[in-house]
Amino acid sequence: MMHDFLRSEVFSITLTLLLYLSFKTLHGRFSYFFLNPILLTTIALIAFLLGTGVTYEEYNRGGSYIGFMLQPAVVALGLPLYFQLQTIKKNGYGIILTMLAGSITGIVSVIVLAKVFGASREIILSLAPKSVTTPIAMDIADTLGGIPPLTAGIVLTVGILGAIMGISFLKLIRVKKPAAIGLAMGAASHGLGTARAAELGEVHSAYGGLALALNGILTALFSPWIVKLLGYAQ
């Protein structure tokens, strides 16, 4: 009876929300970078699954409802973007060029590094869309000939690392403008980076959401050409 309850959708949703809210409260109180609530929730859920024998598929029957909310959450990023629309229009060319450079650099750098460390072709193609939000990244990886589930894990890892260390790194290299911080976080760490940037203010959130969207489009457009140019096309 208890085992059936642990596998239920209601328990999966409740456990996930309680863990996240608990770790978010902990992070708000102590503010240490390693207390990132998404990271800690992920670790706690993995420990739960391993300890109880509940499979990921059984857990995800409830978890998928939480995943579904990602779509309206991403759409909600359009609200701060709307409030900054006039400023964004004035800097449109600079933003496009910045995002173009960021997208190409993100793809090329990870392919080169993966090659240096001896990764296989499939792994390299799975890594190429690492900085794009998960649904887009998985489609890109599938189109390129990579492994979509592996890409999903890589995207989550990149997002968590960016959310944990991104703001501190930008401060270290003296990036101070809210627009620049938002663009950098959204381009490098997609939704999780944008969520972290949004904690700093509305301008950060607006530019983070813009970068998330533009980087997804540009990566989808340019990754097949870059992969072909570097000799990894199917």
Image (cartoon, grey):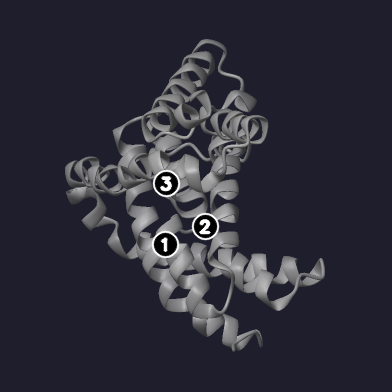
Binning the other alpha carbons within 10 Å of mark 3 as few (below 14), some (14 to 19) or many (20 upward) gives many
What is the quadrant of residue 31 in the picture? top right
> What quarter of the picture does the C terminus occupy?
bottom right
Left/right placement of residue 142 relative to residue 35 reads left
Where is 143 relative to 72, above or below?
Answer: below
Residue 193 visible in the displayed image: no
Q: Which residue is drawn at 52% across and 40% down?
A: 175
Q: Where is residue 218 in the image (x, y as percent from the top left)?
A: 41, 70
Kindly identify the amino acid type of the residue bearing the numbered disc 2.
Ser
Q: Residue at x 42, y 62 (%)?
A: 215
Between 228 and 102, the one nearer to me in the picture: 228
Task: Assess whether mark 2 and mark 1 are in contact (beta carbons under 8 angstroms).
Answer: yes
Kindly identify the amino acid type of the residue bearing the numbered disc 1.
Asn
What is the spatial separation of the Cα atoms under label 1 and label 2, in whole angstroms?
8 Å
Q: Position of residue 45 (x, y in %)?
A: 57, 32
Q: Where is residue 193 in the image (x, y as percent from the top left)?
A: 47, 42
Residue assigned mark 1: 215
What is the spatial separation of the Cα atoms under label 2 and label 3, in whole angstroms?
10 Å
Instruction: Find residue 191 and name its label.
Output: 3
Looking at the rendered structure, the number of numbered marks drawn on it comes to 3
Q: Which residue is drawn at 42% across and 73% down?
A: 220
N-term mark: 1 or 2 = 2
N-term mark: 2 or 3 = 2
